[in-house]
Amino acid sequence: MALAEKDPYIRSFALLREKVPSFAQYPFHLPAIRDLDRIALHPKVTYIVGENGMGKSTLLEALAVAWGFNPEGGTMNFNFSTQDSHSTLYQYIRIVRGVNKPRDGFFFRAETYYNLATNIDQMDREPGFGGKIIDSYGGKSLHEQSHGESFFSAFLHRFGGNGLYILDEPEAALSPFKQLSMLSRIHALVNKNSQFIISTHSPILMAYPDAALYQLTTEGIQPTRLEETDHYVITRQFLNNRERMLKELFLDE
C-alpha cells in the first residue's frame, strides 16, 4: 500500500504553548513560532518556506530533534556534536505519529554537512567489525567530492526508502539541473513509502505536485501555493523583466 493511502510517519506537530517559558525570548519571539499552533503534514512532501530569519531552520531542527535525530544531522545513530547551538524549542514540540514506523531516516542540514562528513571519516578510521559507513554514501569520502556531489551522494545512496527524511536547505550546493534530479529522487523515494519535510528557498524543489506548502512570514505561518511564494514571484519577475529590474537595482541613490 502506498504511503499516500495510509498514515504518514508524522501526521502533525504542535507547540505546547502552555509550557513555553516566555514568548519574549528566542526562539519563541519569532512570529512563526509565537503564533504556532498545529501543523498538519502531508504524507508525501511538506515544504516550510520563507525569508531568511523567519525561523525555518529553527523549526525544522526542533522537529528533527524531537523525533530523535542528532541536531547536526545524520541518521538516528549519529550523536556527534561540534557546537551545541541548537535551541530548546524541541522540548516544547509535540509530535503526532502515524501508525507505521519508518525503517530509514535522515536529518540533512546543509549548514553542518561538513561536520557530518568529517564524523563519518573519523568513525571509519576507527577499528570495527562492520563495513565502512561511507559505503552507504557511495563509497567515496564526502570530503573528496565537490560540495554538490557530496550532497547528492547522500540523497542517492544513503536514502533507501520507507523513510522519514527531514531536509534543511538541500539545494544549497545543487545546480538547477541537480535540483531537478533531486525532485526525481524525491519522487522515487515517495513511491517507496517515504515522507519528506523540506525547508528550501528553491522554487524548483518546491514544485513537487503532491505536497503541502507552508510559508513563514512576520504574520505567522500560512498554507500557500508555489505560485504565491515570494521565491516564485520574484524569480519569475526577474527572468521575465531582467533588464528593467537590473536598472532599478543599479540606480544611483
Image (cartoon, rainbow, N blue to C red):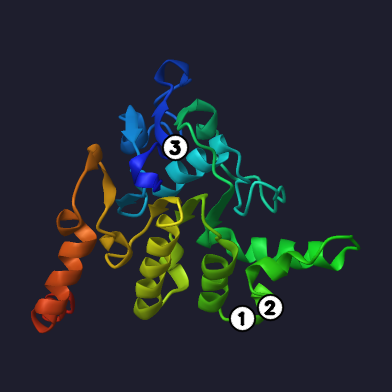
Find numbered disc 1 in the image and state the secondary structure of the residue it sits on: loop
The CA span between labels 1 and 2 is 8 Å
Of marks 3 and 1, which one's residue comes earlier in the chain? 3
Please name the residue shown 46% across and 21% down the image: 20
Residue 110 at x, y percent in the picture: 51, 62
Q: Which mark is residue 10?
A: 3
Q: Residues within 10 Å of mark 1 (few under 14, many from 20)?
A: few
Find numbered disc 2 in the image and state the secondary structure of the residue it sits on: loop
Is residue 14 shown above or below 60?
A: above
Disc 3 residue type (three-letter): Ile
Residue 239 at x, y percent in the picture: 16, 78
Q: Which residue is mark 2?
A: 140
Please name the residue shown 58% across and 68% down the image: 157
Of marks 3 and 2, which one's residue comes earlier in the chain? 3
Q: Residues within 10 Å of mark 3 (few under 14, many from 20)?
A: many
Disc 2 residue type (three-letter): Lys
Residue 137 at x, y percent in the picture: 64, 69
Q: Are circles 3 and 1 on residues that touch, CB within 8 Å?
A: no
Please name the residue shown 56% across and 60% down the image: 160
The CA span between labels 3 and 2 is 33 Å
Q: Quadrant of residue 34?
A: top left
Is residue 235 shown above or below 91?
A: below
Relative side of 171 to 51, left or right: right
Q: Nearer the viewer, residue 69 or 103?
A: 103
Of marks 1 and 2, which one's residue comes earlier in the chain? 2
Q: Which residue is mark 1?
A: 145
Q: Are circles 1 and 2 on residues that touch, CB within 8 Å?
A: yes
Relative side of 104 to 82, left or right: left
Residue 45 at x, y percent in the picture: 35, 51
